[in-house]
Amino acid sequence: MKQLYKYILGGITILSFAQCGSSQKFVSQEEVPFQFGEVLVENWTIENSSDTGVNVFFPVENKVDTAIDSVHFRGQVVKPERIKRGTYLVYIARFRNKKSPGDIIMHADPSKEAANAPPIIIKQSPFELDTDEVVISYVQEGETKYYRISGIKETTPVVYPHKSKN
């Protein structure tokens, strides 16, 4: 009987720790230190290439000393780039669309296999979001907090010129 109690207690302990790790905390709008301008989504592609992606722009209108840690969007998560020019501050999250792997060279000579490109690893987001929603995470007073932004707008797609490797 004591063995049964040990197994039940062990199972409850493991389940409680598993539940703590999977919980996500959303912060209400009043508690967010950022005051964003219009959050925009820009689809992009490179001409004569299969490379495509999405950039998400977060213009910050107030002066804050807290930084955005990561951006969750359409099933992916990336660390945003912070750009500051004068009093203008914007975060840009750059997402690459998944592309099919190219030709893989399999050869007995390892030097010929060295031409294979390494795979692009895309981090998956734990949040289930609509296509017009994004979640930002930031650290405030040692605690990671999350904030969901809905109703973001898409701009016209951009085609960047292909850069040659010369």
Image (cartoon, grey):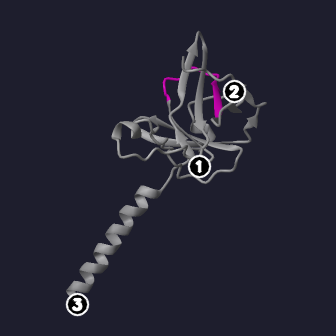
Q: Residue at point 59% right, 28% down? A: 92
Residue 37 shows which numbered tag?
2
Numbered label tally? 3
Sooner in the amino-acid sequence: mark 3 or mark 1 = 3
Looking at the picture, how far across and down is residue 61, in whole percent? Answer: 64, 22
Looking at the rendering, which quadrant does residue 62 occupy? top right
Secondary structure under badge 1?
A: loop
Q: Mark 2 or 1 closer to N-term?
A: 2
Q: Residue furthest right?
A: 156
Three-letter amino acid code of the residue under disc 1: Gly
At label 2, counting other C-alpha atoms closer than 10 Å, the crowd grade (few under 14, some 14-19, many 20 or more) is few
Query: Residue 96: x and y, percent?
Result: 59, 38
Residue 41 in view:
no
**Tag on residue 75?**
1
Residue at numbered disc 3: 1
**Measured Cα–Cα span from mark 3 to mark 1:** 46 Å
Q: Is residue 108 visible?
A: yes
Q: Is residue 165 left or right of residue 47?
A: left
- Report the quarter where the N terminus lies: bottom left
Secondary structure at numbered mark 3: loop
Residue in front for this viewpoint, 58 or 100: 100
Q: Nearer the viewer, mark 3 or mark 1?
A: 1
Q: Which residues are magenta?
A: 53-67
